[in-house]
């Protein structure tokens, strides 16, 4: 269906806003999702502060062309844009939904720290644990030698007693 020139200008303005205000952008390939699943996904994304926007690929290419380093990934099929001010939240949430709706949604690529990434790289970025989990892992690494020392000293004290 053809869209009016005014509507195209609105979409381009929205994509320009996404381009300038987002830390991370994920190109989402979706196909055959029913309305209930799409609505549930959009609600969950909105709750996490992740925007989700469907636009024509030609308008996406026009808006994003030359805006970031590297080559824009090949966008085939129906494509949407997931974006957020959080660097890894869009990729994590889309990966979560890709696991839930295997045949209907997938990561097609994206933009991370101003560089175009392909689907494999964006999926790898989506695998990064959340910041609180990373902090917990770091504390565990720091605590491990101290815990080993305490256990060793406790064993020596029990042996002497």
Image (cartoon, rainbow, N blue to C red):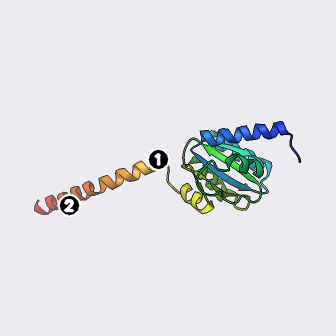
Point out the residue furthest to the front here.
Answer: 66
Question: Which quarter of the rendered picture does the C terminus lie within?
Answer: bottom left
Residue 152: assigned label:
2
Residue 145: assigned label:
none
* Residue 158 falls in image quadrant: bottom left
Per the image, the residue denoted by label 1 is 131
Q: Is residue 86 visible?
A: yes
Q: Is residue 49 visible?
A: no
Tell me the CA gap for discs 2 and 1: 32 Å
Place of residue 120 in the rendered image (x, y in percent of width and height, measured from the top left): 60, 63
Q: Residues within 10 Å of mark 1 (few under 14, many from 20)?
A: few
Place of residue 12 in the rendered image (x, y in percent of width and height, measured from the top left): 74, 41
Pointers 2 and 1 in contact (C-beta within 8 Å): no
| For residue 98, above or below residue 59 | below
* Most foreground residue, 72 or 40: 72
Q: Is residue 146 left or right of residue 118?
A: left
Q: Secondary structure at mark 1?
A: helix
| For residue 46, above or below residue 122 | above
Q: Secondary structure at mark 2?
A: helix
Place of residue 73 in the rendered image (x, y in percent of width and height, measured from the top left): 66, 59
Place of residue 92 in the rendered image (x, y in percent of width and height, measured from the top left): 58, 52
Residue drawn 54% across the image and 56% down it: 125
């Amino acid at each position: 269906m053809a869209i009016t020139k005014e509507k195209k200008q609105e979409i381009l303005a929205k994509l320009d806003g996404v381009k300038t205000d987002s830390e991370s952008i994920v190109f989402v390939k979706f196909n055959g999702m029913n309305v209930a699943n799409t609505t549930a996904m959009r609600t969950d994304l909105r709750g996490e502060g992740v925007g989700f926007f469907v636009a024509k690929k030609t308008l996406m290419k026009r808006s994003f062309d030359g805006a970031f380093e590297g080559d824009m990934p090949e966008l085939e099929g129906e494509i949407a844009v997931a974006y957020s001010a959080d660097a890894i939240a869009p990729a994590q949430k889309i990966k979560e939904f890709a696991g839930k709706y295997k045949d209907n949604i997938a990561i097609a690529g994206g933009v991370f720290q101003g560089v175009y990434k392909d689907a494999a790289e964006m999926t790898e970025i989506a695998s990064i644990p959340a910041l609180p989990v990373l902090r917990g892992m770091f504390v565990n690494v720091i605590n491990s030698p101290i815990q080993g020392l305490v256990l060793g000293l406790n064993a020596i004290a029990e042996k002497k007693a």
